[in-house]
Amino acid sequence: MALIFRLSPAQCVQAVALLATLAGVLMWSSLLLTSARSSAPPPVREGAAATPDSPALQWFSNRPAALDIKVSGVISVAHGAVAIMSLNGAPPRAFVLGERLAQGAHLVAIERDNVVIERGSERARFKLDTLPTAPSMPPLTQP
């Protein structure tokens, strides 16, 4: 007697789903059961100190942060004065008197041609960047 094996469409879908599940279990078990490469950082020497630019050191330190300050201008407004400054190469923006520039650094004075920044217990003056004087132009009308 001949054995005839027929699959219905529903049985085909079940067989494909079973094979996909089995393939997924085999792939994930091989990935999860193999040992991974170590991504730990290299060991630090005992005598090595953290660099002053380290973000972690700046975060937990009481020392003022290092700043590269460029003063572009000052503006007098009705409520006081505003200094236009660039910090650490960022685009210039406006700062008001007493505003915190970074950890431990505050704007304490805005003067006509410079600003005073207090960092910790030290005060530093930053001169306003000025344009070079332009050469005098000849008269544009004939005498």
Image (spheres, rainbow, N blue to C red):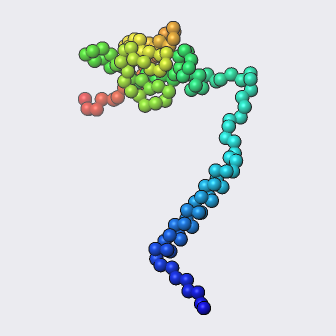
Tell me which corner region of the image, top left, top right, bottom left or bottom right, holds residue 92. Answer: top left
Residue extending furthest toward the front:
1
Horizontal and vertical percent for residue 126? 46, 16
At x 46%, y 30%, the residue is 90
At x 26%, y 32%, the residue is 141
Horizontal and vertical percent for residue 80? 30, 14
For the C terminus, which image quadrant? top left
State how many labels appear: 0
In this picture, residue 47 sits left or right of residue 64: right
Residue extending furthest toward the bottom:
1
Pick whichever, 105 or 115, lies toward us.
105
Horizontal and vertical percent for residue 82? 34, 19
In this picture, residue 20 sits left or right of residue 96: right
Q: In the rendered image, is residue 96 in sight?
A: yes
At x 40%, y 11%, the residue is 109
Tell me which corner region of the image, top left, top right, bottom left or bottom right, holds residue 99. Answer: top left
